[in-house]
């Protein structure tokens, strides 16, 4: 069994490929984040936040030569996803907004304020099957000039927001965390998971992923889903069986739908985010500090399209 795998539960053996190694695809970054897979274009987009660029990686090279600049400057873009029409949706720290890239390359602003005040610095984003856009709004992009522009927050809390698919109205949905970060739905969209990464600046803070039931268009029953035992949770994704694969200080940790830690994939750099990709959605792309890594697994990513 490859030394990159640590098994805490027998179920993890059925989720990973023991002979699969960790491929480093790109390096030389400052802080890699926000990977999103485009199957129709056979490529991955991801952010290099401090360098103000979105990069594009396409299969065919393991030495880093497969990466090119997709957009620069990027507005200190962080997390990305795709909407149900396949368009790129991005969180921009520097511009303090959520945007959509149209098919002609133009950019539409989805959200940049709430209650007449600027957002903090949108971080991660997901799109529900009804077209609603959910995003987190911590203050990382305004804490310094490294990942955005230093500024005082105008919002009174760090929240999760929902953008109505018809009216475009931005509604605050939850605020019971220090720094809301990564977010993802369960495969049936009955649960929303949200990482609280507040321990990045408050070492005694809990290092947790919260779970909320989605009921009647709102969030109910806030609870701790799991706790990260090394580093902090940042970005994560869910497979078709409902397992949560999350970033951590030592690599990627995998949790069952009941919150049981199943195992981990060790990565030589601190992991910020990850996504499933490839033609069968069974390749885990991992953004880890200065590099982009990938490893094949037997799990299949649940995100769509």
Image: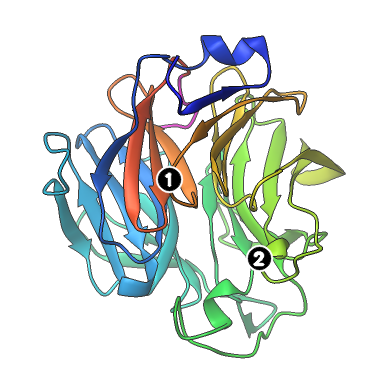
The location of residue 145, given as percent across then percent down, is 46, 86
Gap between marks 2 and 1, in whole Å? 19 Å
**Residue to which mark 2 is pinned:** 200
The location of residue 205, given as percent across then percent down, is 80, 61
Picture colour scheme: rainbow
**Residue to which mark 1 is pinned:** 268
Quarter of the rendering containing residue 102: bottom left
Q: Secondary structure at mark 2?
A: helix
Q: Is residue 25 visible?
A: yes
Please check the rendered image and state whether residue 301 is part of the magenta-colored stretch, yes or no.
yes
Q: Does residue 195 sit above or below 186 in this rendering?
A: below
The numbered dot on residue 83 is none
Which residue is at a point 53% across and 74% down the rendered structure image?
A: 112
Q: Does residue 223 sit above or below 8 in this rendering?
A: below
Which region of the structure is painted magenta?
300-305
Q: Is residue 226 shown left or right of residue 269?
A: right
Which residue is at a point 72% across and 69% down the rendered structure image?
A: 158
Give the class, few, some or many, for how many residues have Cα within 10 Å of label 1's Cα (few <14, many ≥20): some
- In this view, the residue in front, 11 or 145, is 11
Q: Secondary structure at mark 1?
A: loop
Which residue is at a point 15% across and 44% down the rendered structure image?
A: 63
The location of residue 211, given as percent across then percent down, is 77, 40
- In this view, the residue in front, 127 or 303, is 303
The location of residue 43, given as percent across then percent down, is 22, 40
- In this view, the residue in front, 87 or 138, is 138
Q: Is residue 153 shown left or right of residue 289?
A: right
Please check the rendered image and state whether residue 247 is part of the magenta-colored stretch, yes or no.
no
């Amino acid at each position: 069994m490859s030394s990159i795998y640590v098994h805490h539960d027998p179920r993890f053996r059925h989720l990973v490929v023991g002979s699969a190694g960790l491929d480093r695809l790109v390096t030389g970054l400052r802080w890699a984040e926000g990977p999103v897979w485009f199957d129709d274009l056979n490529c991955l987009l991801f952010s290099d936040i401090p360098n103000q660029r979105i990069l594009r990686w396409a299969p065919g090279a393991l030495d880093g030569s497969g990466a090119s600049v997709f957009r620069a400057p990027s507005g200190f873009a962080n997390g990305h996803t795709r909407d149900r029409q396949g368009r790129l949706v991005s969180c921009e720290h520097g511009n303090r907004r959520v945007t959509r890239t149209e098919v002609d390359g133009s950019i539409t602003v989805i959200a940049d304020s709430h209650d007449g005040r600027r957002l903090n610095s949108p971080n991660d984003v997901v799109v529900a099957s009804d077209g609603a856009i959910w995003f987190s709004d911590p203050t990382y992009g305004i804490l310094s000039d490294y990942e955005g522009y230093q500024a005082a927050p105008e919002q009174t809390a760090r929240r999760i927001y929902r953008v109505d698919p018809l009216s475009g109205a931005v509604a605050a949905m939850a605020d019971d965390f220090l720094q809301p970060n990564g977010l993802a739905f369960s495969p049936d969209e009955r649960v929303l998971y949200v990482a609280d990464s507040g321990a990045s600046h408050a070492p005694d803070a809990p290092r947790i992923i919260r779970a909320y039931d989605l009921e009647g268009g709102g969030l109910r029953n806030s609870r701790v889903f799991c706790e990260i035992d090394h580093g902090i949770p940042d970005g994560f994704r869910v497979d078709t069986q409902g397992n949560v694969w999350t970033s951590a200080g030592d690599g990627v940790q995998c949790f069952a739908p009941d919150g049981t830690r199943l195992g981990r994939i060790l990565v030589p750099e601190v992991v910020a985010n990850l996504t499933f990709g490839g033609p069968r959605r069974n390749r885990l792309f991992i953004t880890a500090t200065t590099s982009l890594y990938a490893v094949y697994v037997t799990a299949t990513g649940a995100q769509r399209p």
